[in-house]
Amino acid sequence: MDFLTIIQILDSTVRLATPLLLACLAGLYSERAGVFDIGLEGKMLAAAFMSAAVAYVSGSVWLGLLAGVGASLALSVIHGLASITFRGNQLISAVAINFLAAGLTVLIAQSWFQQGGRTPSLIGGARFEPITLPFADSLAGVPFIGPIYSDLISGHSALVYIALAMVPLTWWILYRTRFGLRLRAVGENPAAVDTAGVSVTGLRYAAVAICGVLCGLAGAYLATGLQAGFVKDMTAGRGYIALAALIFAKWRPWYALGATLLFGLLQAVALRYQNIDLGGVVIPVQFMDALPYILTVIILAGFVGKAIPPRAGGEPYVKER
Amino acid sequence: MDKMPRWADVFLIPLISLLLAAGLSALVILAIGENPWAALKMMVSGALGSTYGWGYTLYYTTNFIFTGLAVSVAYHARMFNIGGEGQAMLGGLGVALACLYLPLPHWLIALPVAAAAAAIFGAAWALIPGYLQAKRGSHIVITTIMFNFIAAALLNYILVNLLRPQGSMDPATAKFPEATHLPTLHDLLAPLGIAFSKAAPANVTFLVGLLACFVVWLLLWRTKLGYEIRAFGHSEPAAVYAGINPVRITVIAMLISGGLAGLMAINNVMGEAERLVMNAVEGAGFIGIAVALMGRNHPAGVLIAALLFGFLYQGGAELALWTSIPRELIVVIQALVILFTGALDDMVRMPVERLFTRRKGEA
Amino acid sequence: MVDNQQTGRPEMVAPDASRAPAIELRGISKAFGPVQANKDISIRVMPGTIHGIIGENGAGKSTLMSILYGFYKADKGEIFVNGDKKNITDSQTAIAAGIGMVFQHFKLVQNFTVLENVILGAEDGALLRPSLAKARKELTALAKEYELNVNPDAVVEDLSVGHQQRVEILKALYRQAEILILDEPTGVLTPAEADHLFRILENLRREGKTIILITHKLREIMEITDTVSVMRRGQMTATVKTSETSPEQLAELMVGRKVLLRVDKTAANPGDTVLEVRGLRVRDEAGVERLKGIDLDIRAGEVLGIAGVAGNGQSELLQVLGGMRSGKGSIRVNGQELDLTGLKSDARSRRKRGIAHVPEDRQREGLIMDFHAWENVAFGYHDDPKYQRGLFMDNDALRQDTQAKMAKFDVRPPDCWLSAKSFSGGNQQKIVVAREIERNPDLLLIGQPTRGVDIGAIEFIHEQIIALRDQGKAILLVSVELDEIFALSDRIAVMFDGQIMGVRDPAQTNEKELGLMMAGITDTGPQGQEASRNG
């Protein structure tokens, strides 16, 4: 495996990790506030479709992005209503949202574009263009550093950089701001927040909304950055991988970056090679596909560093002494 | 006393939820420029208007009976088994191995053997999440989701690398031997002088499904084990008081649940495809969630809800064939049913309860 | 209600006319469904005092304080703070009125640091750093002033319970609370921690803070309060100056003297020892030792009553005997050792050894509320061969059995198809008692047999217990109702803090003596280390 191949794989890792990272951080906000969300998949899918559809019609990827975020937010509101206001089952609500998105996207796509549940291919301004960082071209010739800078670090679309910037930002919000303190508290012990005179409902809706926005970005990146247009079921389980990454990261932002990069790398390798021959032992590509899930189960089982979810997660808050 | 008569809880609430889901779906159909009434008529005639339609409707119904029962049994032990999809996939593997490698001379022998294999494989796939939930507190919802994906990868590997016949490009097993082919409803009804479509895939498994409903009802309401499962599901402290072991019940309930999901494979793999293909389950594991919620986790309710979804699936396929409404309309309806009967139950329930308490107050 | 003459209640404390009460409640009432938790409660708490509110569990103390802190809304009544009428709708308005509350179950975020917990909800701006710095300084000052030392950077879950409680007090003080409510603050503390808490409270009083101390422990009231109000069954029965009362008098006010329950019974005729408990120790899920070496004997044909304030280990004793918990030590039934851990220590094995159990909480443990009456009649005995028919349960036999039991125990309505939740409390209890007594056990464990049960059913259940005794069975009765203990027991053991304080003959003791023992005070010498402090 030569240096250039490694750069290429890593470059593809970054691209593939981006939607995972955004969705993972989305889940992080929601679950840190005590609202479990296995509906990341559905929100991403809805955003992917709306962003592609609006970007195609308007020709503007930014309008598309806005529409994608809007679609994802709308589903977040449903999840919030069910799990916060009506104290319903958060898991069932999210399952419903996943199906709602899977069905509606195809239905509307078919109705609008008549292309079998996909949007037409996006071209030009309807897609996120790669951003070339300063000096990328001039440095490209420098050995070692050059390819790393110009091929790996430079040349991604805006959302990739936004996603990466979200990691320190999320860390900062969670651990350095009043909002973050309250958000973490409401996921651990809503009664503590309530007795301190802060609205549990308000905080949880805020968290669910942020989750919607970030899922929106993740979905929009899929359809308008990573690929050129929406196809049916294009999230292909990424929402669940993001969920796995969130557990793997034990609900912490920097670890989320690590986990999603790892899972992105697995995807990149699986895409490039069918089977990996490690000195006689052949690792099938399917094993690479399943690895994120297997790792998550191992973590969940508590055999390697137990993942403890936010303590109040999954339970609607009912006031009691 | 109860706030609401039982009939309202059992029939009225699901009915209102269903009507809400249907109403919203009608709006969706309107929004994409089709006529909901015409669509409904086409669905009815397509799914119920001919023995061909019935054959498909009952075929889908059979799938949903098994996955719906699977979700229900786990639910009675207060677990949300979202892994029916993976368990049904593994059940398919069990069926394929049995049909391909065991000498099965006649379908009457093949059916119970393959059914046992399907149940064992499905149960085995539910065992690990069940055990981890019981012993280590790992959330069953997350582990079963993960196991769905692991199952898909595992099956993919086995089909591509191990079971694919030489020279075939298709990731699927060879066709099962003739002796293992299950009789369709056409075959079963012909001796009785009843004409039934030859082309439809509904087969003898439908009767197994009906039997399964009855057996699950017996299990839950007529056996000691079912009694313990239900008691545990209602109250864990009470179960401990009564000497019911929570770990044992959790694991057993998941084994039964996984076994039922696995049993679905005798319908779709053995009865219809007659070979194991990728994605044979086609989301039926997830529809089981809607079926169970809608059927209030009672086998009779599951049967009715499975019929409803069987009708929706076949009707939806007809719509997709003759109109511009794609099959995904059914997924939307399914989502709305889950949303209203599962997550927004309180939203529907509270006004109805108020209505009843007010009426009682006036009386 | 307590009769004024009979108990010799001292006069109400005259309000200090010069200052408005820090807290005044007028006519507070609160009902939860059919349960009247607070009935027309009026109380004045003078500033700069420690005001105790004493009463048994369920007397309505916590409800009252939750109303004051805006957690519940009173159905009726008014709240005045420093003479001004306040409409306290939520915690925020309570905090703004200068009220702080330390709940019985702490409202702390376990994985936060002390500092983070203190500033939560009282931050000074959108960024944490300045708030944290300010709180750190303030905490140092508060620590010095009130002996409230806690490491501000410690994570709460690593702190001892006593330190966690200090964090709760710090939270309130950081929010400028002038009035501090503590709900059963010593329930979870070791004696040394409790002493330290009292020093803190005295310091707070010296600085002019007002403290409301809710407790069911007489010793604490006598030790630290200036004034004490007694609550019983949702009502305020008396408010007295602590210096003018005595533990005996308070015990009587607290337990009350209701219509004495008469149970016709002959003298016990005890036979062989059925239950022999030696050195029984139990730890709860949090690792706190709830039973600290219990020794007990019960003979055939006698009722041993366990008296005590709720929460002193009685529940754990019943649970370990009934196979719902594991423990250490030795339990013998009819001379045979029982397993205290492992698979054979479960409730099923206990039943096979002839132990029947009427649990303290019938709704949570004794019954499945959504099951039909006939399903509940098999609960715990559902593997009995007489309820089986081949592979299946013989539901017809069960229903017949249920109808017979319902008739015998006068369960109303006698409809075996009703779900358990449709019956009144008394009839629910009759179903449980019928199920357990009709097994003809060698040993009956029975907890709070008449809690939430109407008078008619009480008498009936009492008669059944005595009838079982007269058949030569051993009975362990746990009740927080002293009257019930007196009415039924042949011997009375008093539990306090996970230990038996002593065993008395009901004919040779009285409520006063038992009340003191229940508070951990005993004349005959302390039995444990804990008690010696109180002597």
Image (spheres, coloured by chain):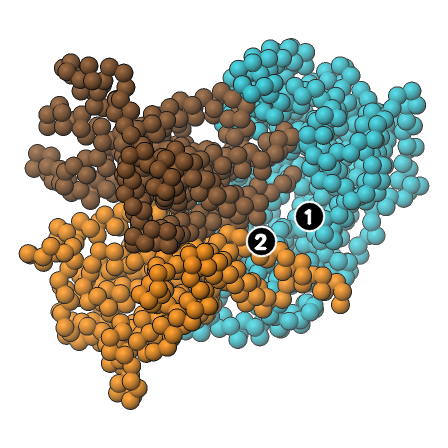
Question: Residue A11 or C167: which is nearer the viewer?
Answer: A11
The dot on residue C479 is 1
The chain letter of the brown chain reads: A
Find disc 2 in the rendering and name its residue: B347
Apparent colour of chain C: cyan
**Residue that lies at the very extreme toward the bottom in this rendered image:** B193
Residue C388 location, x and y as percent?
Answer: 46, 71
Circles 1 and 2: CB atoms closer than 8 Å = no
Q: Can residue B294 be seen in this view?
A: yes
Residue occupying image coordinates x 13% and y 62% = B174
Please state if B264 lies on the left or on the right of C445 as rendered: left
Q: Which subunit holds the residue at mark 2?
A: B
Residue C222 vs C232, above or below: the answer is above
Task: Name the image quarter holding residue A40.
Answer: top left
Say which quadrant the C terminus of chain C sits in.
Answer: top right
Label for residue A41? none
Circle 2: is it few (<14), some (14-19), or many (20+) Cα within 10 Å? some
- In the rendered view, tell whether residue C104 sits above or below residue A98: above
Q: Residue A98: x percent and y percent? A: 40, 49
- The chain letter of the orange chain reads B
Residue B136, visible in the rendered structure = no
Q: Image point 72% across, 52% down: which residue?
A: C33
